Image (spheres, helix red, strand yellow):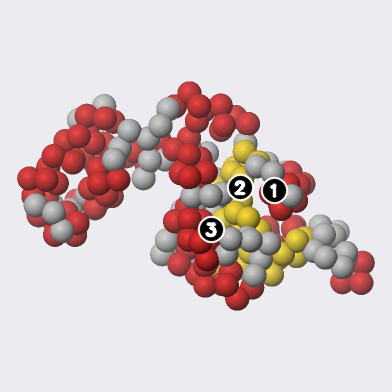
Amino acid sequence: MDEMPESRRPAKCVRVLLAEDQGMMRGALALLLGMEPDIEVVAQVGAGDEIVRTALTARPDVALLDIELPGRSGLDAAAELREECPDCRVLILTTFGRPGYLRRAMEAGAAGFLVKDGPVEDLAEAIRQVLRGETVIDPALAAAALSAGPNPLTPREADALRASADGATIADIAAALHLSESTVRNYLSAAIGKTGTRNRMEAAREARRQGWL
């Protein structure tokens, strides 16, 4: 199927920014969306810390963001886009359909949340829907999020778990977070209890599985 010639495109296309770290996936999405007569991919980035800067230049109508990106997560970028580019609607597209991610995306101001296993026609329609001001959420994920309940971790407990990755010591974590070692131990102990795990490594894995980190 050939890409739609410019002469056959509507006068006003939906301008899309695409953020995806896997080059092949990014290129395929851009190609498929470009075949839609009313959608134009105006910018592509492969890292989360490029999203806001690129959006300020390209001025997309919709930002299609993956979550797990190098440099910065799509969820963090979504929150800044809400402040810096309030007219840009955010649609999260991710491999990881985790209830915690959905809640965080909505809190960050995202207008939609889809997983990558759906057909491109559904994605194109979701882009149109969020541009119209609608909210689009994968139905199965929405049901899972309702049953999972809210994130039990406080922001500081989550910070402590993130900082404990790669075998960091209590002293390392305390230095990174500018906290005392006893305070770090308290945060990690609370996080372990709330995740129902045996140690901080298991707690971090469970928190990531739930989408809380």
Cα–Cα gap, marks 2 and 1: 8 Å
Q: From what the image shows, is residue 205 above or below residue 45?
A: above
Is the residue under label 1 in contact with that under label 2 (CB below 8 Å)? Answer: yes
| Residue at numbered disc 2 | 111
Callout 2 touching callout 3 (CB < 8 Å) = no
Which sits in the foreground, 78 or 23? 78
Q: Earlier in the sequence, mark 3 or mark 1?
A: 3
Nearest to N terminus: mark 2 or mark 1: 2
Badge 1: how crowded within 10 Å, few (<14), some, or many (20+)?
Answer: few
| Sequence order check, earlier mark of 2 and 3 | 3
In this image, 53 relative to 205: left or right?
right
Give the structural element (helix, strand or loop) at label 2: loop
Left or right: 58, with 1 as reference point: left
Image quarter (top left, top right, bottom left or bottom right) of the C terminus: top left
Q: Does residue 20 appear in this view?
A: no
Residue nearest the viewer, comparing 71 with 59: 59
Q: Amino acid at mark 2?
A: Ala
Q: CA distance from mark 2 to mark 3?
A: 11 Å
Residue at left 42%, top 61%?
72
Amino acid at the residue labelled 3: Arg
The residue labelled by disc 1 is 133
Q: Which mark is residue 82?
A: 3
Residue 36 rendering spot, x and y as whole percentages: 81, 57
Tags 3 and 1 touching, CB below 8 Å: no
Horizontally, is 106 left or right of 35 in the view? Answer: left
Residue plotted at (75% across, 65% down)? 40
Task: Check disc 1 and give the amino acid type.
Answer: Gly
Residues packed near mark 2 inside 10 Å, few (<14), some (14 to 19) or many (20 plus): many
